[in-house]
Image (cartoon, rainbow, N blue to C red):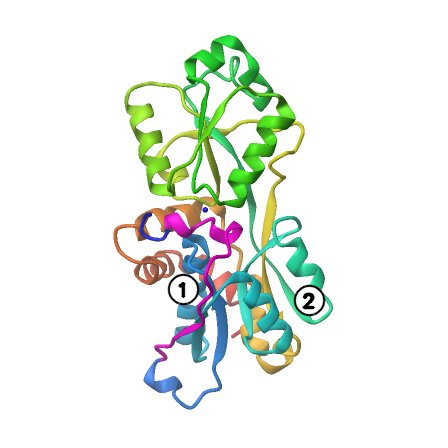
Amino acid sequence: MTRDLSSLNRRRFITGTTTLALASTPLAVLAQAKPIRIGWTAWSDAEVVTQLAKLILEQRLAQKVELVMTDVALQYAALQRGQIDLMLMAWLPGTHKAYWEKVKDDVEDLGVLYTDARLGWAVPDEIPVSVLRSIEDLKKPEVQEKLNGRIQGIDAGAGLMKLSEAAIKTYGLDYKLQAASDAAMVSTLDRAIQRKQWIVVTTWSPHWMFSQYKLRYLEDPKQTLGGTEEIHALARKGFGAAFPKAAAFVRNMKLPLADLEAVMFKARESSAAKEAAAYVSTHGEVVERWLANAV
């Protein structure tokens, strides 16, 4: 799934060229500490969560952190081989099922970071639910006319687009799926909302646009686009024993989806690191709960 990082947000379905690069900026006081290596991919949700974890590990647990940016498939393999210590972006049980099945006996599942992640088709909330509640309702002649027989999609090669093409066939819809970048999709959505026009967009949660617009997902009774997912933190075997305080913190780290999307939205105008720091500074009670068993 161009924007700041939003256009890469859902490229978990497009594993393009793979790079492996370190982004290490440990505090001077941590120079002698054994680092925790956290794998991440440039999806805006993953970057925010990773920056939150890095900040707290370094500032509150005096733990040096190195960030390893690489393709999601390589992160699973690197965890299995012990080349990285953590990844904070495992989409389970569906999206990353194939990766998980290969490594599940060789990694530690530290639990759920946030819930209600999903793929789907969304519409502006001002469109009457009585007329358009479900993907099935797109068959109604009056609905198809309002939508000009089009569904606004994202990048042509995205997995979400492949699922959307399958959904059109499964539901027997006479619609054209319009490919565009994530930024173009949001721009088209914004224009339609400003003009009070009807629109259906292919999207996912978490996405910053849910903090900017009032949207709702269309029901998908045939589950062609999948169900809701949980994002888990995974660690290499032996991580909990090697870094007990860090493991305790990660197990406690639970982030409401709305909070995550709000930080992602703000990060568009600044950076994930800056907005993660702002979240930590204004959510002291939340952070203390995360650290309850770690300090």
Q: What's under tag 1, amino acid-wise?
A: Gln
Q: Is residue 173 above or below residue 268?
A: above
In which image quadrant can residue 137 be found? top right
Residue sitting nearer the eye, 6 or 153: 153
- In the picture, residue 78 is in which quadrant? bottom right
Number of other residues with Cα within 10 Å of mark 2, as a class: few under 14, some 14 to 19, many 20 or more: some
Q: Residue 293: x, y in percent?
A: 57, 70
- Quadrant of residue 147 in the image? top left
Toward the viewer: 101 or 210? 101
Magenta stretch bounds: 6-26
Question: Quick check: 27 left or right of 10?
Answer: left
Which class describes the residues within 10 Å of circle 1: few (<14), some (14-19), or many (20+)? many
Q: Nearer the viewer, residue 91 or 115?
A: 91
Circle 2 sits on which residue? 103
Q: How far apart in space, not on screen, are marks 2 and 1 (Cα)?
A: 25 Å
Residue 66 to residue 252: above or below = below
Residue 230 in the image: x percent, y percent? 60, 50
- Residue 235 in magenta? no
Percent of width and height locating residue 95: 61, 49
Q: Secondary structure at mark 1?
A: helix
Which residue is found at the position 40% from the left and 60% from the top? 284
Type of amino acid under label 2: Val
Left or right of 105: which side holds 287? left
Residue drawn at the location 62% of the way across and 23% of the way down: 171
Give coordinates of residue 169: x percent, y percent: 61, 27
- SS at mark 2 in the image: helix
Furthest-top residue in this view: 142
Residue bearing mark 1: 51
The disc, 2 or 1, on the residue closer to the chain's N-terminal end is 1
Q: Are marks 2 and 1 in contact (CB under 8 Å)?
A: no
